[in-house]
């Protein structure tokens, strides 16, 4: 274990083997860090507020939390969790294996996130969002939750497995993005979508099946379903799942 002398780590926190804590990081009482986790400088883990209770912040093994990130109590992140810099994730967030969230990501809590999910930088995820497995959310996407702001009503967005939401898109409260779908860049989605379908525009409309898009690598092969050709950055266990999914389309 390596804890920088400027770090403040509660004696009540539970740290596993081979944990690294960087300069000026604060780890509060109700925090459980598994083995082989790297926490860089100026992070704060286990923040509490009026909505937290006695449940700990749990960070799974082999995770990497980059500098200036803030994680609230009452959240759980499975193994191989990775953040960019200056990420904020609020209370009651449950995330699966190998979740990656980019720099300046903002997850507002009360969210459920599946395995092998990828959020790029500057993504905002509203409260009560539910994200499936192998979902991609690209920069500056916003998932909203208030149907007539400001109000006390929350209707979280649902994003199903293998869906892709391209940059600068907005998904309105209560909308379901169906599995394998593609939301084109700069779209505003105000109604539920269909599986394996492209939606584009404001308001977004169905413009075709994802299978009609071709790779721009000269092969002219279908770009979707994307597991047939893209596996970069995934661990071996995830690649096996992707290969199995791809074989179903043969």
Image: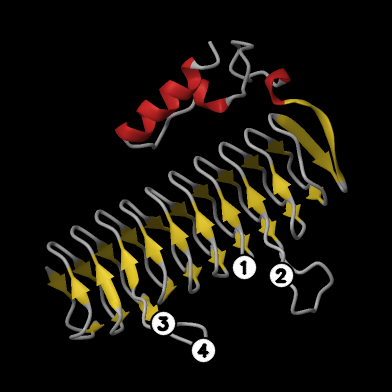
Mark 1–mark 4 Cα distance, whole angstroms, equals 16 Å
Choose between 3 and 148: the one closer to the eye.
Answer: 148
Residue 50: give its label.
4
- Asked whether disc 2 touches disc 1, contact meaning CB atoms under 8 Å apart, the reply is yes
**Residue indicated by mark 2:** 154
Crowdedness near tag 2: few (<14), some (14–19) or many (≥20) residues, C-alpha within 10 Å: some
Q: Which residue is mark 3?
A: 47
- Give the mark nearest the N terminus, 3 or 2: 3
Of labels 1 and 3, earlier in sequence is: 3
| Residue found 42% across the figure and 32% down from its top | 232
Asked which secondary structure carries label 1, the reply is loop
Q: Which residue is mark 1?
A: 127
Instruction: Give the number of callouts.
Output: 4
Q: Is residue 168 visible?
A: yes
Q: Nearer the viewer, mark 3 or mark 4?
A: 4
Frontmost of labels 2 and 1 is 2
Q: Residues within 10 Å of mark 4 (few under 14, many from 20)?
A: few
Q: Which tag, 4 or 2, sits closer to the chain's start?
A: 4
**The residue tagged with tag 4: helix, strand or loop?**
loop
Mark 2 vs mark 1, CA separation in Å: 8 Å
Tell me what residue is drawn at x 56 percent, y 66 percent: 106
Q: Position of residue 27 (x, y in %)?
A: 29, 80
Marks 3 and 2 close (CB-CB < 8 Å): no
């Amino acid at each position: 274990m390596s804890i920088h002398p400027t770090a403040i780590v509660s004696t009540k926190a539970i740290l596993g083997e081979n944990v690294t804590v960087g300069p000026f990081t604060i780890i509060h009482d109700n925090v459980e860090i598994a083995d082989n986790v790297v926490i860089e400088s100026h992070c704060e883990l286990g923040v509490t507020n009026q909505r937290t209770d006695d449940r700990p912040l749990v960070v799974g093994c082999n995770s990497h939390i980059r500098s200036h990130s803030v994680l609230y109590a009452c959240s759980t992140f499975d193994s191989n969790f990775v953040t960019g810099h200056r990420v904020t994730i609020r209370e009651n967030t449950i995330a699966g294996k190998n979740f990656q969230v980019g720099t300046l990501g903002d997850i507002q809590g009360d969210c459920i996130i599946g395995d092998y999910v990828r959020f790029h930088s500057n993504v905002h995820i509203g409260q009560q969002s539910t994200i499936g497995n192998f979902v991609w959310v690209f920069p500056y996407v916003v998932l909203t939750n208030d149907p007539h702001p400001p109000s006390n009503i929350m209707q979280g967005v649902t994003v199903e497995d293998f869906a892709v939401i391209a940059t600068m898109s907005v998904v309105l409260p209560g909308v379901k993005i169906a599995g394998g779908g593609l939301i084109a860049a700069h779209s505003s989605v105000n109604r539920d979508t269909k599986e394996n379908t492209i939606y584009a525009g404001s308001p977004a409309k169905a413009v075709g099946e994802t299978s009609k898009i071709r790779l721009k690598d000269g092969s002219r092969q279908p770009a979707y379903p994307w597991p047939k050709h893209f596996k970069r950055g995934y661990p071996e266990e995830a690649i096996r799942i992707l290969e199995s999914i791809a074989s179903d389309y043969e």
